[in-house]
Amino acid sequence: MFTLMSDPEPPSSARDRHHVLDRLLPALVWPLLGVSALWLVAAVQWLTGISYVWLGVFPRTLTGLPGVVTAPLIHESWNHLLANTAPLLGLGIIAMYGYPRATRQAVPLIWILSGLGVWLLGRASFHIGISGLTHGLMFFVVMIGLLRRDVVSIALALIVALLFGGMASGVVPREPAVSFEYHLFGAIAGILSAVALHRLDPKLPEKEHERAPPDDDGPPDGGTADTNPWIGTPDNDEDRNRRD
C-alpha cells in the first residue's frame, strides 16, 4: 500500500498565507464589533422610545461639546443606521486589513477631529451619525494609496474608489437634513491621518514572481545539486528562513 505524495509547498508561500490570515481575522472582527455597538444603541433607543438626538454635536455650545464623543453612536432612524452600516463594514475591513496599526490610531483621530470641526463650524443644529467616520476612512485609504504607491496600497485605494467613491459628493451641501459638515470634516481628518500615519505599517509580502530578480553575483544557471528549487539559494536552514 502506498500514498501519492504531492510536491511540498514553498516555505515562503506558507508564510505569506499565514501573514494574510493574521491580518484578515482582526480586519473582520473589529468592524463587526463596531457595527454591533451601533445596532445595540439603536435597539435600546427603539425599545425605550427615547430619542437620544440630544447626545449629538450642537455647534459652539458647552452642552453640545460632549457630542464630539457621543454623536457618532446615535442615529435618527433605522434607515439612517442602515445607510451607514455597509460603508462602515466595508471601509473598516479594507482599512484594517491593509493598515492595521495606522487604522487603530486613525479611527479615534477621525472620530474626534470630525466632531470638533462640526462643533466649531457646523450649522446650529444637532449633528449625529457615524458618517463622519465612514467618510474619513474612505479618504484615509485613498490618500494612503497615493502616498505609499505600492501594489497593495494602490489596489486597496482603487477598490475603495470603485465601491464607495460616490460618498465623496457628500462633502458639499445637498440636503438640508444631512450633515455635510460631518462628511467634510471627516474627510479632512482622514486625509490628515493618512499623511501622519501612512508609514506606520510594513508592506504586505509580495508574490514570488513580483520580487526583484537575484543579484548578478548569485549562483549561475545550472548550479550544483544542492541548490534549493524553491528559492534558488543553497539548501540549508539558515538561508531557507531568511527573507528580504
Image (spheres, rainbow, N blue to C red):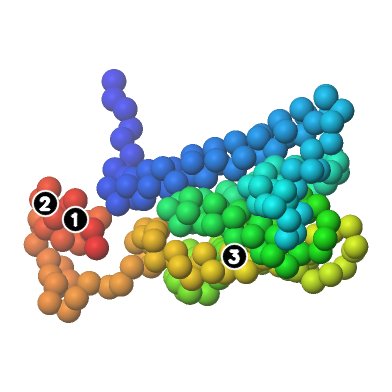
Q: Amino acid at mark 2?
A: Glu
The residue at the far right in this view is 176
Could you tell me which secondary element the residue under label 2 belongs to? helix
Residue 162 visible to an observer of this rendering? no
Q: Are marks 2 and 1 in contact (CB under 8 Å)?
A: yes
Where residue 216 appears, as percent x and y from the top left, is 17, 79
Could you tell me which secondary element the residue under label 3 belongs to? helix
Q: Are marks 2 and 3 in contact (CB under 8 Å)?
A: no
Q: Amino acid at mark 3?
A: Ala
Figure check: 154 above or below 204: below
Judged by depth in the image, the label closer to the viewer, 2 or 3, is 3
Report which quarter residue 137 is drawn in: bottom right
Q: Which residue is mark 2?
A: 238
Figure check: 204 above or below 33: below
**How far separated are the C-alphas under marks 1 and 3?**
39 Å
Q: Which residue is mark 1?
A: 242
For image coordinates 52% across by 45% down, the residue present is 27
Q: Quadrant of the N terminus?
A: top left
Q: As drawn, is 234 to the left or to the right of 127?
A: left
**How far separated are the C-alphas under marks 2 and 3?**
45 Å
Judged by depth in the image, the label closer to the viewer, 1 or 3, is 3
The residue lying toward the viewer, choosing from 206 and 200, is 200
For image coordinates 23% across by 58% down, the residue present is 243
Q: Which residue is mark 3?
A: 189
Q: Count up the numbered dots.
A: 3
Q: Amino acid at mark 1?
A: Arg
Mark 1 or 3 closer to N-term? Answer: 3
Figure check: 195 above or below 20: below
Figure check: 51 above or below 229: above
Q: As drawn, is 115 to the left or to the right of 154?
A: right
